[in-house]
Image: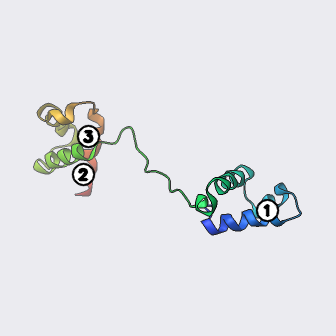
């Protein structure tokens, strides 16, 4: 569960002001101890602003085609809609040198297949 900045602050205040042990309070609140201590360290280092949720960075996939390459594949697929992904892979790899570098034919075929099935 993700907690907002104010919820984290409320949990920190609850722990600081309570006579109960940190472990017991966190168990009752169902908050992982390492998570709490990470929040607490951020709070000590940066104050209330340190509790802002840092949204995860966009995931990068090792097998995803770069956008400019994907656009070239889309153009080729749309120029020849009757061809299968396998038939399209050869012209894509041989006539488009930008696409040819470091991209596996299977990735190009899958990209073409998705385009054909969604068009």
Which residue corresponds to mark 3? 109
Mark 1–mark 2 Cα distance, whole angstroms, equals: 54 Å
Question: Do callouts 3 and 1 mark residues in contact (Cβ within 8 Å)?
Answer: no
Disc 3 crowd, CA 10 A, few/some/many (<14, 14-19, 20+): many
- Tell me if residue 94 can be seen: yes
Q: Is residue 109 left or right of residue 21?
A: left
Residue located at (85% from left, 58% from top): 24
Which residue corresponds to mark 1? 15
Can you give x and y, in whole percent of width and height, for residue 78 in the image? 14, 51
Q: Is residue 104 above or below residue 22?
A: above
Identify the secondary structure beneath mark 1.
helix
Identify the secondary structure beneath mark 3.
helix
Can you give x and y, in whole percent of width and height, for residue 27 in the image? 80, 58
- In terms of depth relative to the viewer, which is nearer, 114 or 102? 102
Q: Earlier in the sequence, mark 3 or mark 1?
A: 1
Mark 3–mark 1 Cα distance, whole angstroms, equals: 56 Å
Q: Quadrant of residue 19?
A: bottom right
């Amino acid at each position: 569960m993700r907690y907002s900045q104010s919820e984290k602050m409320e949990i920190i205040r609850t722990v600081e002001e309570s006579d109960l042990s940190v472990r017991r309070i966190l168990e009752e609140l169902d908050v992982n101890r390492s998570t709490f201590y990470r929040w607490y360290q951020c709070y000590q280092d940066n104050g209330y602003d340190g509790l802002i949720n840092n949204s995860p960075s966009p995931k990068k996939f090792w097998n995803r085609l770069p956008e400019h390459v994907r656009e070239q594949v889309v153009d080729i697929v749309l120029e020849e809609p009757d061809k299968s992904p396998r038939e399209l892979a050869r012209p894509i790899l041989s006539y488009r040198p930008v696409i040819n570098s470091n991209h596996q034919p299977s990735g190009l075929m899958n990209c073409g297949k998705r385009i054909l099935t969604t068009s």
